[in-house]
Each structure stands twice: as structure tokens, then as C-alpha cells.
Amino acid sequence: MFGVDAAELQFQSKISSQPAIVITRGERSYDDETLSKKTIVLNPGDEFTRQIKATVRGSLPVEYNVRREGLVLDFGLSAVVLHGFGKYVAVKSFEQHSDSVVVQYLPKGPPYWDGVITSSPTDVEFRSGH
């Protein structure tokens, strides 16, 4: 499974409308050729479903070099800090540009799509285990 950058995810509290805080471990670097091998080219009308996994923690791991307590979704190289238990709306964004360096490794064909697409909103609820 290819890792998810938490910056591509938006979590917003359904009660306070506050957005979650995104924290990264530093600059993300990608191997363009390896990334292109994981790229899925969709034709018009095609669909793709992706499963996203995170570790739920009570604070950020020390590797983030930031102290933050609370409800944390740790994706490995980036994390989302939520404003506590409760109901949230989550969406994921995807951005693609035909001039991306990854495109040079993809099969030749019609021009690739340029733009940003956002998933349908997903309701998520976090509850205390106590």
C-alpha cells in the first residue's frame, strides 16, 4: 500500500467546524519512477477505491520533533491531530498535472488530466474506549 500524505486529507469537526491540524516529519521526497509504477491510469467512467490506514495515538511520536497531545492519526510520514473525540467529516484531495515528472514514466497516450478532484465526504466518528 502506498502511504498517504495527511495534507491530502481534510478532517473537519461536525460540532465546531474546526479543521484538524496536519503535521509532517519534514519534506516528502518521491522516487518518480517508483511512484509512476504505483500510478493507476483511469479511463473515462473508470472508478478506483483506495483504503487508507493510520495508527491512532494519544500523542505525536517523538520522530515528528513536535510535542502534541490529543487524538492523533499517524500515517507514518505525516499525521492529523484532531480536536478530540466526536464526529468529523473527512475528504481526500488528489491533484494531477500533465507536466508532472511522473508522466514521463507512464504509457504514452492521450493527454493526462490536469486538475484537483476531491472525494465525496465521509462521516467518521471517534469514540473513547473507556
Image: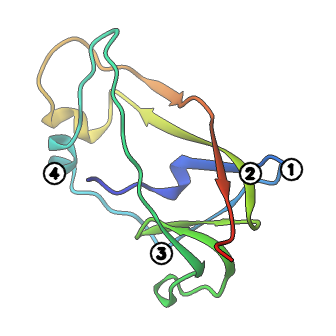
The label number, if any, that marks residue 15 in the structure image: 1
Query: In the image, is residue 118 above or below residue 89?
Result: above
Q: Which mark is residue 25?
A: 3
Between the residue at mark 1 and the residue at mark 2, the CA separation in whole angstroms equals 7 Å
Could you tell me how far apart the alpha carbons at marks 3 and 4 are, in whole angstroms?
A: 21 Å
Q: Along the polypeptide, which appears first: circle 1 or circle 2?
A: 1
Crowd tier of the residue under label 3, counting other residues whose Cα lies within 10 Å: few below 14, some 14–19, many 20 or above: few
Amino acid type shown at disc 4:
Thr
| First in residue order: circle 3 vs circle 2 | 3
Image quadrant holding the C terminus, namely bottom right
Identify the element where label 4 is drawn: helix
Nearer to me, 39 or 125 = 125
Circle 3 sits in a helix, a strand or a loop, which is it? loop
Q: Nearer the viewer, residue 46 or 114?
A: 46
User: Where is residue 84 shown, x and y percent of the image?
Assistant: 75, 68
Query: Residue 121 appears at what percent x and percent y?
Result: 62, 33
Q: Earlier in the sequence, mark 1 or mark 4?
A: 1
Amino acid residing under circle 1: Ile
Q: Disc 3 vs disc 2: Cβ atoms closer than 8 Å? A: no
Q: Residues within 10 Å of mark 1 (few under 14, many from 20)?
A: few
Foreground disc of the pair 1, 4: 1
Q: Residues within 10 Å of mark 2 (few under 14, many from 20)?
A: some
Q: CA distance from mark 3 to mark 2?
A: 27 Å
The crowding category of the residue bearing disc 4, from other C-alpha atoms within 10 Å (few below 14, some 14 to 19, many at least 20), is few
Q: Mark 2 highlights which residue?
A: 87
